[in-house]
């Protein structure tokens, strides 16, 4: 019997896998290929997309792309007047919408929309097939959290965008047969906010095989007045920019009071110029790497991984990556939200500047504690989390949705 056909629509070209959402999606598709479904992946494609032909081949049976759009700064600001949230309006593409309409006309057995943003490409929200939407975040929640920490005109803009996203998510999510969340916490939020009736969960995974554990004991003790911390993430996103600022202005002065030779590695693309200028003006030992091919050497080169995020939703893959590599973590509640990790066993929790500085200093001065947390975290990942496991969860949910949809048509 031929396998049922699954159309997977992504608002982003998945390669290189240098962002959390792309890492999650690409790894699960790779693990699903050759399984229960014949996979068609549809997404925008950049001009250099041909460089990633091998990665595409390993992730789907068929790829269909359209030219990626490039919106300038002015164009993005003009979209503030749109009825749609700016982040959704920026994913609209006339060519992309025509491409998706053509693929839907082929009558796939299941259509999966990756991120609510991708639904803007659909001709309508009335499906003639089983439908699933994969929500990596509760998008409106991200905007709400930005509005809580912003001031002046920025707060008004975030509040406006939050209201638009709330309306967009409610209309969109309730139109699908099944909604997938990345944690039970997000699933409860989606059910409460939007009244979605069938909300399922897929765990966050980690590539244990490619992330070799390096014991903190192998790295040795941090020098008495020094030590290295690391933060990884795209440095041009509002949530990461805010987190880096919080770490730099509120936490770091407390760290260097006790450890004046401490240094920090900020690893990720496009660091904001004003952040680099601020670090230079303060005379602190911070390095902004910009885009790197591989974050692993930078994480391993640190004593402690810090997640200083105050804004976000969903789950942060960077947490599991640092844990897999053997680097103990200090994180805010938002940083580890949705992950089944316990403060004091797998990481140290810290939401205030004083608590975060104290946690960093505690780890830098205690190799035994670094080792204890690192080993416990790695064991947790090996026992419970893998991309293969997450992919099987996604596959089962899609099969279940298809069976329910087919039964309702009899």
Image (cartoon, rainbow, N blue to C red):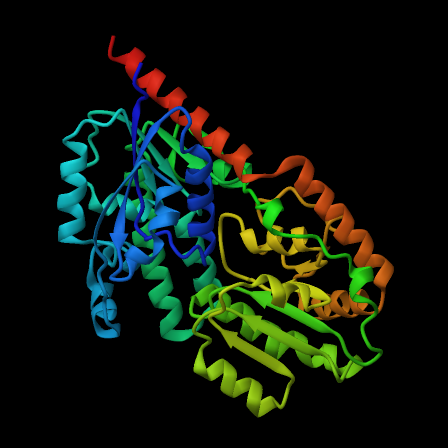
| Nearer to me, 26 or 188 | 26
State which quadrant residue 253 falls in: bottom right
| Nearer to me, 361 or 325 | 325
Q: Quadrant of the N terminus?
A: top left
Please give left or right for residue 185 compared with residue 327 in the image: left
Query: What residue is drawn where x is 43% and y is 47%?
Result: 138
| Nearer to me, 298 or 264 | 298
State which quadrant residue 152 falls in: bottom left
State which quadrant residue 297 falls in: bottom right
Looking at the picture, does residue 193 appear above or below residue 321?
above
Looking at the picture, does residue 44 appear above or below residue 291?
above
Q: Measuring from the top left, give residue 73's x and y in whole percent.
A: 26, 73
Disc count in the image? 0
Looking at the picture, does residue 19 appear above or below residue 29?
below
Can residue 167 be seen here? The reply is no
Q: Measuring from the top left, give residue 89's x and y in whole percent.
A: 23, 56
| Residue furthest top in the image | 410
Looking at the picture, does residue 276 appear above or below residue 37?
below
Q: Quadrant of the C terminus?
A: top left
Please give left or right for residue 126 compared with residue 19 in the image: left
Q: Measuring from the top left, give residue 90's x and y in whole percent.
A: 25, 59
Q: Measuring from the top left, give residue 156's x and y in whole percent.
A: 35, 67
| Nearer to me, 200 or 292 | 292
Can residue 204 be seen here? The reply is yes
């Amino acid at each position: 019997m031929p396998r049922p056909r699954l159309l997977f629509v992504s608002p982003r070209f998945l390669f290189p896998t240098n962002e959390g959402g792309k890492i999650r999606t690409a790894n699960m598709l790779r693990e699903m290929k050759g399984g229960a479904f014949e996979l068609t992946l549809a997404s925008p494609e950049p001009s250099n997309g041909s460089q990633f032909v091998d990665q595409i081949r390993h992730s789907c049976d068929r790829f269909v792309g359209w030219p990626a759009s490039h919106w300038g700064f002015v164009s993005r600001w003009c979209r503030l007047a749109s009825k749609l949230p700016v982040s959704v309006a920026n994913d609209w593409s006339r060519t992309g919408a025509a491409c998706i309409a053509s693929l839907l006309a082929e009558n796939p057995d299941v259509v999966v929309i990756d991120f609510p943003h991708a639904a803007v490409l659909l001709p309508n929200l009335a499906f003639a097939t089983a439908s699933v939407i994969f929500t990596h975040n509760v998008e409106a929640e991200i905007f709400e959290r930005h509005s809580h920490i912003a001031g002046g005109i920025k707060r008004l803009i975030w509040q406006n965008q939050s209201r638009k996203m709330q309306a967009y998510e409610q209309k969109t999510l309730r139109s699908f047969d099944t909604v997938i969340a990345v944690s039970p916490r997000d699933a409860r939020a989606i059910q409460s906010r939007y009244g979605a009736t069938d909300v399922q969960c897929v765990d966050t995974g980690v590539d244990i095989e490619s992330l070799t554990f390096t014991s903190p004991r192998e790295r040795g003790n941090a020098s008495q007045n020094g030590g290295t911390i690391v933060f990884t993430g795209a440095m041009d996103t509002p949530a990461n920019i805010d987190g880096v600022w919080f770490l730099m202005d509120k936490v770091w002065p407390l760290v260097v009071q006790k450890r004046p030779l401490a240094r920090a590695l900020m690893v990720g693309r496009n660091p904001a110029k004003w952040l680099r200028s601020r670090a230079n003006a303060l005379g602190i030992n911070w390095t902004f790497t910009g885009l790197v091919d591989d974050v692993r050497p930078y994480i391993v080169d640190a004593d402690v991984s810090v997640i200083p995020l105050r804004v976000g939703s969903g789950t942060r893959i960077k947490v599991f990556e640092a844990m897999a590599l053997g680097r103990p973590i200090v994180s805010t509640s938002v940083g580890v939200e949705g992950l089944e990790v316990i403060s004091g066993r797998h990481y140290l929790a810290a939401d205030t500047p004083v608590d975060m500085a104290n946690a960093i200093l505690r780890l830098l001065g205690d190799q035994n504690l670094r080792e204890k947390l690192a080993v416990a975290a790695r064991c947790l990942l090996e026992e419970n989390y893998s991309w293969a496991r997450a992919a099987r969860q996604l596959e089962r949910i899609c099969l279940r949705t298809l069976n329910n949809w087919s039964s309702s048509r009899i």
